[in-house]
Image (cartoon, helix red, strand yellow):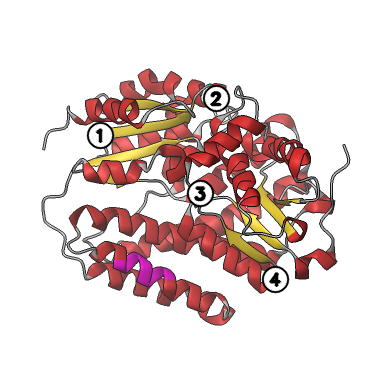
């Protein structure tokens, strides 16, 4: 199939749109890509038009995240805000057999109907779409890792403080920390002063008074897009806070480590090339060290609960499922549920797209084995699709929360 290619000349002239998933992380990533000459904008459209355009341009049997991502792009291109002759779209690819690879071709097919001139760009570390991808370098990889480190920390501390905020204190702290990070993106020396960055973020959130008795914690696991995107999960974190609970969401870097560990598993189990294994292992070790460094830093502030180490997920995975089960979010979902349960999070929402076979197997299908290890954990598997009503979804979550001892 013929499709437009993104040339070096376009880099200066084109605006590149990226979909909503994690606003803080993705805004930082957009700013970093700006340092490399790309004009990137994060889409924030969350109207019904997104679902309608998705349903119109994607087969209704296709998974819900694909429908939303493609619908959001097409809604933006139809808005009249962008010059469609000078606009490209960007999505990530992991090289696996699920959403992060196959959306690329679905998106191209959808755009061909009305916007055949719009190039589709890929951000990946697997060597995919060489003629239509962001040029990946070691420096860019390190900067993107820093974006995720800061984004994960802000997200974690925000979720631990906003159930207790008065007059929007946590919202202001989140915004201040985001601005602090953005202001330093364009100065690499300051941007990589991680301890100074961590200290500012922790000190800023420390100004919020937290009670001794904390509210019940509710973990969120599941398919990566539905787990993180407020567009996909109907603002799930906000709903959990409104129900008098504290949301606990694993960091984005956990998913990246999961993807890297899968590359190493391919080499170990299936004898895949060592030339993919070696850089994956080096990247895994670097990112894991940075995460553990951040955890040690958070532990210096007793009022906050540090995120769990990915090493814990790896160990808990061995209790319940083989690491060869890696389609979609694979073994990561049950491993995260066990890790949360062992660390006092007794209520978990497993968010999954309706009809997503991998997630139904490793999410809903693993509830019984998880409860054998953590018998006091309540798990509510929630299916999201274009026709699922907020009332139905919220009632199912409320049913789970009704069992909480407050």
Q: Residue at x 62, y 59 (%)?
A: 81
Q: Are marks 1 and 3 in contact (CB under 8 Å)?
A: no
Label 1: how many Cα within 10 Å (few below 14, some 14–19, many 20+): many
Residue denoted by label 2: 356
Residue 195 is tagged as none
Distance from Cα at disc 1 to Cα at disc 3: 26 Å
Q: Earlier in the sequence, mark 4 or mark 2?
A: 4
What residue span does the magenta drawing correspond to? 172-178
Q: Which residue does the image show at 43% across and 57% down from the upper left?
A: 152
Q: Nearer the viewer, mark 1 or mark 3?
A: 3
Q: Mark 4: which secondary structure?
A: loop
Q: Nearer the viewer, residue 23 or 295?
A: 23
Q: Is residue 242 magenta?
A: no
Gap between marks 3 and 4 measured at Cα = 22 Å
Q: Separation of disc 4 and disc 2 at Cα? A: 36 Å
Residue marked by disc 4: 36
Q: Position of residue 83 (x, y in %)?
A: 71, 60
Between marks 3 and 4 in the image, the one whose residue lies nearer the viewer: 3
Crowd band around label 2 with a 10 angstrom C-alpha radius: few (<14), some (14–19), many (20+): some
Q: CA distance from mark 1 to mark 4?
A: 44 Å
Q: Nearer the viewer, residue 134 or 47?
A: 47
Q: Which mark is residue 21?
A: 3
Residue 234 image position (x, y, % from top left):
39, 39
Q: Please tell me whether mark 3 sits on a helix, a strand or a loop.
A: loop
Q: Total marks drawn?
A: 4
Instruction: Tell me which numbered mark, 1 or 4, is placed earlier along the sequence.
Output: 4
Where is mark 1, residue-wise?
346
- Left or right of 166, for residue 233: right
Q: Is residue 332 visible?
A: yes
How packed is label 3: few (under 14 Cα within 10 Å), some, or many (20 or more)?
Answer: many
């Amino acid at each position: 199939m013929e499709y437009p290619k993104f040339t070096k000349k376009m880099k200066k002239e084109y605006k590149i749109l990226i979909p909503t998933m994690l606003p803080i992380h993705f805004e930082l990533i957009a700013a970093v890509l700006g340092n490399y000459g790309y004009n990137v904008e994060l889409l924030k459209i969350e109207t019904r038009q997104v679902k309608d355009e998705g349903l119109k341009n994607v087969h209704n049997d296709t998974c819900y995240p694909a429908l939303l991502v493609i619908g959001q792009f097409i809604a933006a291109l139809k808005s009249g805000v962008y010059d469609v002759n000078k606009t490209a779209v960007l999505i990530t690819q992991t090289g696996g057999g699920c959403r992060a690879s196959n959306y690329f071709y679905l998106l191209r097919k959808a755009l061909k109907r009305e916007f055949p001139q719009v190039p589709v760009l890929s951000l990946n570390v697997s060597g995919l779409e060489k003629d239509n991808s962001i040029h990946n370098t070691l420096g860019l990889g390190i900067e993107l890792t820093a974006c995720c480190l800061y984004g994960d920390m802000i997200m974690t501390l925000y979720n631990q403080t906003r159930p207790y905020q008065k007059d929007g204190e946590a919202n202001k702290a989140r915004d201040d920390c985001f601005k602090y990070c953005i202001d330093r993106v364009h100065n690499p020396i300051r941007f990589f002063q991680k301890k100074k960055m961590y200290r500012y973020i922790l000190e800023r959130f420390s100004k919020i008074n937290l009670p001794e008795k904390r509210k019940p914690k509710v973990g969120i696991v599941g398919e990566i897009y539905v787990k993180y995107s407020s567009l996909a999960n109907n603002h799930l974190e906000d709903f959990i806070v409104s129900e008098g609970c504290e949301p606990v969401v694993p960091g984005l870097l956990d998913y990246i480590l999961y993807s890297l560990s899968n590359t190493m598993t391919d080499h170990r189990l299936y004898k895949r090339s060592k030339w993919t294994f070696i850089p994956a292992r080096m990247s895994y070790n670097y990112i894991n060290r940075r995460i553990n460094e951040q955890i040690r830093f958070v532990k210096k502030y007793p009022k906050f609960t540090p995120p769990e180490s990915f090493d814990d997920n790896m160990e808990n995975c061995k209790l319940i499922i083989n690491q060869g089960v890696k389609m979609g979010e694979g073994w990561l979902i049950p491993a995260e549920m066990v890790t949360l349960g062992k660390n006092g999070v007794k209520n978990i929402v497993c968010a999954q797209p309706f009809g997503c076979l991998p997630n139904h197997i490793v999410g809903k299908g693993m509830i019984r084995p998880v409860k054998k290890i953590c018998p006091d954990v309540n798990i509510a598997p929630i299916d999201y699709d274009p026709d699922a009503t907020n009332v139905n979804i919220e009632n199912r979550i409320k049913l789970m929360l009704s069992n909480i001892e407050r």
